[in-house]
Image (cartoon, rainbow, N blue to C red):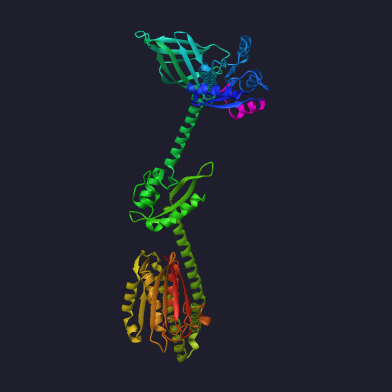
Amino acid sequence: MPEVIRILHIEDVATDAELVQRALKKAGLQFEACVVDEKETFINALTQFKPQVILSDHSMPYFDSVEALELLQEYDPGIPFILVTATVSEEFAVDMIKRGASDYLLKDRLQRLPNAIITAVEKRQMQLEHHQVLLDVINSEALLNDAETLAQFGSFEVNPAAHTIKLSNQFYRIFGFNSRDIQPVCKITYNEKYHTVADKIHIALSDVFIDLISNKKSYTIIDKNGRLKFLSAEFRIDKSADGSIHTIKGFLLDVTKLKYAESLLQQSEANLKTIFSITDTGYVLMAHDQKVILFNKKAAALVEDMRGIPVREGAAMEDYVVSERKEFVQEIVHKIMQGENVSYENRFVNKKGETKWYLLQWYPVTGDNQRRHGIMLALSDITERKILEIEREQISADLIVRNKALEQFAYIVSHNLRAPVANIIGISNILAYGDSLAREDMHQFLQALSSSTKHLDGIVNDLNHILRITHGVNEEMQPVNFQQLVDDIKTALAGIIKSTHATINTCFKAQPGMVAVKSFLHYIFYNLILNSLQFVHPLKQPCIFIEAKAAGEKIELIFRDNGCGIDMDKYGNKIFGLYQRVSASGGGKGMGLCIVKTLVDNMGGHIKAESALLNGTTFYIDLPA
């Protein structure tokens, strides 16, 4: 019962209303009263005041209890209506009770009114609670039916003593029946020693049945329509006070779809694991926080080879990234989480000191809602392929160099060898018919023949010298220290350095050295330094500056002097040709720069010169690192 009862009182005499309230207060009743005496105010009070009980006088000038009760019946017939009036006939009082009034009292006997109100309100409260229980039951049954249908399970209840069995609608559907089509049959086999213990519960619908022999077990059946079904059953036995079985309650779950899905999933997982394990590509799956979730054996082997540490689940990706590349990797991760795919090749020196090439491919792991759930990293060892590519590139470079050499050889043959050979042929022809030649002429022709032969021999020796030097392309690569190389050359050229009072300064802090064919670098440094010492400025003390620095994936060598310089407009396209001399001063045959360029080309590099007359010369050489 509510702590404060809302009472709507229909009364046109104020003193009578006060008497009623005084009687209720005297009885200790907690209430809130609203007094009305007209139809309109009564109707408004029903909706606004929301009374829990109504007290009504019978007769008023413009309104009476009969009309008030009829209005209440239309609004809510469950609200208690108590007639509190002056003397009325018994017949009228009975008629009001029949119409729906809860009770009636006379105004001169108000002692019973508090109890009448309490009884009426409590009765109303019980009716409301009972109604709610009925609604809950109805809703629960409907909800249970919906839940059973959605979850594909059916419930059952067996009462052995009453020989009754109750099956839910979904239980029938699992067996392929409708609850209206057939009556279920239930038989219980008891343990011979303990009759109160059930060994088997047999539930059958026609020729489709299931034998429950354990309180939790899986079963297979063929339903009415011939379909194979996988079921999971579970039940509980409730016993009476004497130990006998009172009821058996349980459920039957249809897991057919789950079984098929599980089978397909297992097959899919098996296929994926097989592919995952035998592929030549290493895969590492990471969560959005860049921690390792899964990896295959190939990935473990590659990571171990690359970083020298084992990969493990739960490890952070940054644990496997060297410090100088962490910023680069985080930029890649940012792109991946934006939905991009990133791939690149990288070179590593493994723990054995071997140079290895790997292809790294990064992919975002994206769900149906396009949300990024993680990162997939694919690792491939492409060392063999990369070596073949490098060899192909080297072969191509060698072919280009050899082709240039052949072109140069053809040029030499057509220009430099042609003249002495023509002279030899011409003189030989004259000497063949030399009977009429004077002794003095004969001697002159023999001297010319000897000179042409020596000239031809010199050209052949020069070509042999170039071939002998460039043959070093097959020499072993080794670390070469630039400063040590310069010091060795300064020792070899000490005489000319001293006689010319030349100074040689170097700056190799940025790039102390490189891995290369040492004989190549020695010849390049030697000839460029020797050139600077031979072609000096007539008014300046010779000064040579040599510098090395890194330029991306290349090493740049710079040789700068303050010598006599070169007229580039006249000789710019000839300075690296054979027998091309660009200055009358100094010695040499015009072979040094030709050999230097040939060696630079063989190393896969490039050389260029900048110069001006009487303003020195600078050579720039780019070599692959």
Report x, y in % for residue 24.
Answer: 51, 22
Magenta: main secondary structure: helix
Within the magenta stretch, is there residue 597?
no
Q: Quadrant of residue 293?
A: top left
Report x, y in % for residue 170.
Answer: 53, 20
Report x, y in % for residue 216.
Answer: 41, 21
Which residue is painted at 49% across and 19% down in the image? 155
Within the magenta stretch, is there residue 47?
yes
Please say if 123 is above or below 611.
above
Please say if 130 is above or below 326.
above
Q: Nearer the viewer, residue 583 or 172?
A: 172
The number of callouts visible is 0
Report x, y in % for residue 436.
Answer: 50, 88
Which residue is painted at 40% across and 83% down in the image? 534
On the question of residue 140 being in view, the answer is: no
Please say if 34 is above or below 199.
below
Which residue is painted at 34% across and 51% down in the image? 308
Please say if 476 is above or below 446.
above
On the question of residue 124 being in view, the answer is: yes
In screen coordinates, is 134 left or right of 61? left
Q: Nearer the viewer, residue 62 or 128?
A: 62
What's drawn in magenta, residue-wise? 39-54
Q: Quadrant of the C terminus?
A: bottom left
Check the image and name the residue furthest to the right. 62
Q: Nearer the viewer, residue 428 or 594?
A: 594
In screen coordinates, is 73 left or right of 249? right
Q: Quadrant of residue 38?
A: top right
Q: Nearer the viewer, residue 595 or 174?
A: 174
